[in-house]
Image (cartoon, rainbow, N blue to C red):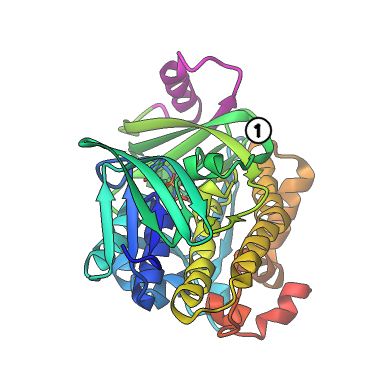
Amino acid sequence: MSDNGVIIVGAGPVGLITALGLAQRGVEVTLLDGADDILDEPRGMTYHWAVLAGLERLGVLDDAMAIGWLNHDWSAQIHATGERISMDIGLLKDDVRHPYSLILGQDALGGVVKEHLERLPNATIRWGHRVTGLDQDGSGVTVHVETADGAHDLRCGWLVGADGGRSVVRRELGLGFEGMTWDERFVATNCRGGYDDHFVSGYLVDAEHGAVIHKITQDGLWRHTFAEPLDLPEEGIEERIAAHFRAVLPEEDFDHKMLLWRHYRMHQRSAQTYRVGRALLAGDAAHVTNPTRGFGLVGGMFDAFALAEALGAVVLDHADDVLLDRYAEERKRVFWDYTTPISSQAKRMVFEPTQERLDAFREAAADPAKTRQYLLSGVALATPSLLGTMDLWETVGASPSLDALRGA
Ligand SMILES: Cc1cc2nc3c(=O)[nH]c(=O)nc-3n(C[C@H](O)[C@H](O)[C@H](O)COP(=O)(O)OP(=O)(O)OC[C@H]3O[C@@H](n4cnc5c(N)ncnc54)[C@H](O)[C@@H]3O)c2cc1C
């Protein structure tokens, strides 16, 4: 790799999207991932409309839309009463280019990005390359890697840590992960069954049996995620999954089958900074949120869009690297000012519903002006071009007329 090349640690969705953005600009990029291929885990699957314009600019949106599906509402169902509350994303149709959420598993989305990346001669993905450490000096970064053939070092001009919540890059940079851990874990399952006839694709609101239940594919695969106290032992989760299903699914004719499950601790945490010298952080390596609002990967995608443009300009055009400080400051500010409060509010509404929280959601759904305002929440996660080539509204594919509504 040339002295100016970029190594990205982690070929998760954020690493792949950052790599594609850099490689399309002409940067030489190498992605390193400890796994053998894209991980198939029950995690991200719903992507807010505001992020779709960025995927379109990368040229991957059509392929992603061809294997995913478009959800036109944002809905909740009250477990105790069966009441359904729904917001029509189509209310934004005159103002935004993509008035819907894109739904597909993050592994499938990653697969689409990987295909596009593999067509570029200046991008390489090396699976089975686990990063164990790094050193940097004034001219570049040396990355220590373990592979099946043994340990060796790789050298690059710039390093991006997109290696997830337990980031080795973040640890090696000596950065902590400030914030809090929620008292519950999420248990996420992939299931089939008669969900279409009994549930909205969205929130199941209840203080005891709350869940996020989303249709993943049009042929009947659903993601059913519930929360349980973190102090319960990990042993016994499978029995508690069965108990949760008994409590919320109809007893008859549901034909339920669980295919996969994982459990996750939930946090609101961020590194103190997303830049140390020639190393940068993006995605879950930089910040993690509870996923109730579907803002984890969406926030990571906005990191990737901003970072690819800024780092590309530094590497290729000798732009002032103060751009990278601005990337770091902006993305951290967005995480604490918007991602965390919006995601925390959503989690409380679903899992700790109060009359006040539910009434606020009902009111937002009942009044088209309030619905439009609610649906703008994802715009706050975006960072407009740090080079000044695009304003906020162009970044998210929306009309500047929405500005008035945002401040309303
Ligand atoms: C239950 C659940 C539901 C979610 N739903 C949504 C949703 O609907 N919408 C949304 O936007 N977000 C959602 N999220 C959040 C989303 O899953 C994460 O934000 C996303 O995975 C972050 O992507 P990433 O690429 O930063 O990290 P990761 O996906 O964690 O990828 C990190 C990659 O780095 C590799 N790696 C790790 N360590 C090393 C190392 N030392 N060396 C080399 N490689 C390494 C790993 O193998 C992996 O491929 C959800 C999360 C959960 C848990």
Task: Identify the secondary structure beneath mark 1.
Answer: strand
Q: Considering only vertical position in the picture, is 386 above or below 273?
A: below
Give coordinates of residue 5: x percent, y percent.
Answer: 38, 65
Q: Tell me which corner region of the image, top left, top right, bottom left or bottom right, holds residue 182.
A: top right
The residue where tag 1 is placed is 182
Please report the residue visible at 36 percent of the width from the left and 38 percent of the height from the top: 190
- Range of residues picked out in magenta: 227-251
Quadrant showing the N terminus? bottom left
- Asked if residue 136 is positioned above or below residue 131 in the image, the reply reads below
| Residue type at numbered disc 1 | Trp
Q: What percent of the width, then of the height, locates residue 64? A: 32, 65
Residue at x-position 42% and y-position 21%: 242
Q: Is residue 330 left or right of residue 98?
A: right
Say if 313 sits above or below 70 in the image.
below
Q: Residue at x 68, y 44 (%)?
A: 349
Residue 286 horizontal/vertical position (percent): 57, 50
